[in-house]
């Protein structure tokens, strides 16, 4: 009888511990979900925004971008820039937001030498409003850091890392086709070798792949969800 009673007590303790543990894990998961940075899902409504051409005569002034409504980006910048663990007020903002689709170095160093013009890239982007209608998703809040050369200055950039942007890649694939038809070397431009993001701000200056940083899922530092 005593053995049976002891076993019943031990079983009750195991069950109660398991239930408590399960409740703790559930609470932990919910807490993590609540901790996610929330961005307004209207940020995805880019189809009704104008396409903004970026044409220039100087180096790095020609590029293609998907215009994003800054009113949904600014609250995220303000939150990040006022959070000690994220930036502690060190970020500079451009006061606008976009997704760069054709990078300035890609145009200057690869596409333009092959005879591809910025007017042709803009025409491809605006046909049926295809680029502004392109869909994308939110992966996370990302941050990249590097010590720039040769000045040895610490640089930092914070961005919204994106995902599920197949339609943007499709645009780049069409650019690739144009590039090859004009005699461009296919090995110089890979339409799929691209990491989409929205820059929130940076310390001193923005950072690029030339600085040795990659703004993909690898750079995630905080969960972000759209709702």
Image (spheres, helix red, strand yellow):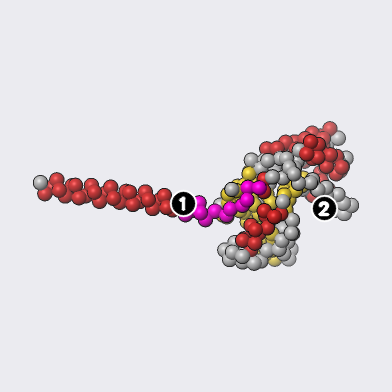
Q: Label 2 crowding class (10 Å Cα cut-off): few <14, some 14-19, many 20+?
A: some
Q: Which mark is residue 218?
A: none
Report helix, strand or loop for mark 2.
loop
Q: Position of residue 67 (x, y in %)?
A: 75, 48
Q: Position of residue 211 (x, y in %)?
A: 70, 55
User: Which residue carries the number 1 mark?
Assistant: 30
* Badge count: 2
User: Which residue carries the number 2 mark?
Assistant: 60
Would residue 94 be found to the left or right of residue 223 on screen?
A: right
Q: Position of residue 186 (x, y in %)?
A: 78, 36
Of callouts 1 and 2, the N-terminal one: 1
Q: CA distance from mark 1 to mark 2?
A: 45 Å
Report helix, strand or loop for mark 1.
helix
Q: Position of residue 190 (x, y in %)?
A: 73, 39
- Residue at x 25%, y 51% (from the top left corner): 13
Q: Is residue 35 magenta?
A: yes
Give the number of the mark in front: 1 or 2.
1
Magenta region, residue range: 31-42
Q: Is residue 6 magenta?
A: no
Front position in the image: 32 or 213? 32
- Residue at x 79%, y 46% (from the top left corner): 50
- Residue 186 makes an appearance in the image: no
- Residue at x 37%, y 48% (from the top left corner): 22
| Residue farthest toward the right in the current orientation of the protein | 57
Would residue 222 be found to the left or right of residue 51 on screen?
A: left
- Residue at x 81%, y 44% (from the top left corner): 110
In the rendered view, tell whether residue 33 sits above or below residue 148. above
- Residue 55 makes an appearance in the image: yes
Instruction: Give the quadrant of residue 88.
Output: bottom right
| Residue farthest toward the left in the current orientation of the protein | 1
Would residue 67 be found to the left or right of residue 218 on screen?
A: right
In the rendered view, tell whether residue 147 sits above or below residue 45. below
């Amino acid at each position: 009888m005593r053995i049976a009673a002891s076993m019943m007590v031990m079983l009750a303790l195991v069950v109660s511990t398991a239930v408590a543990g399960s409740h703790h894990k559930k609470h932990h998961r919910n807490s993590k979900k609540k901790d996610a940075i929330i961005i307004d899902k209207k940020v995805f409504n880019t189809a009704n925004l104008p396409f903004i051409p970026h044409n220039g005569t100087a180096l790095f002034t020609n590029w293609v971008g998907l215009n994003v409504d800054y009113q949904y980006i600014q609250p995220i910048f303000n939150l990040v820039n006022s959070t000690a663990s994220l930036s502690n007020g060190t970020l500079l903002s451009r006061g606008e937001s976009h997704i760069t689709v054709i990078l300035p170095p890609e145009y200057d160093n690869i596409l333009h030498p092959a005879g591809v013009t910025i007017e042709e890239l803009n025409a491809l982007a605006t046909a049926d409003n295809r680029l502004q209608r392109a869909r994308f998703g939110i992966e996370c809040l990302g941050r990249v850091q590097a010590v720039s050369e040769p000045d040895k200055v610490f640089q930092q950039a914070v961005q919204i890392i994106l995902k599920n942007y197949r339609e943007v890649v499709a645009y780049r694939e069409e650019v690739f086709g144009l590039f090859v038809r004009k005699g461009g070397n296919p090995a110089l431009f890979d339409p799929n070798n691209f990491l989409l993001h929205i820059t929130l701000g940076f310390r001193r200056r923005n950072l690029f792949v030339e600085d040795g940083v990659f703004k993909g899922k690898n750079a995630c530092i905080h969960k972000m969800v759209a709702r």
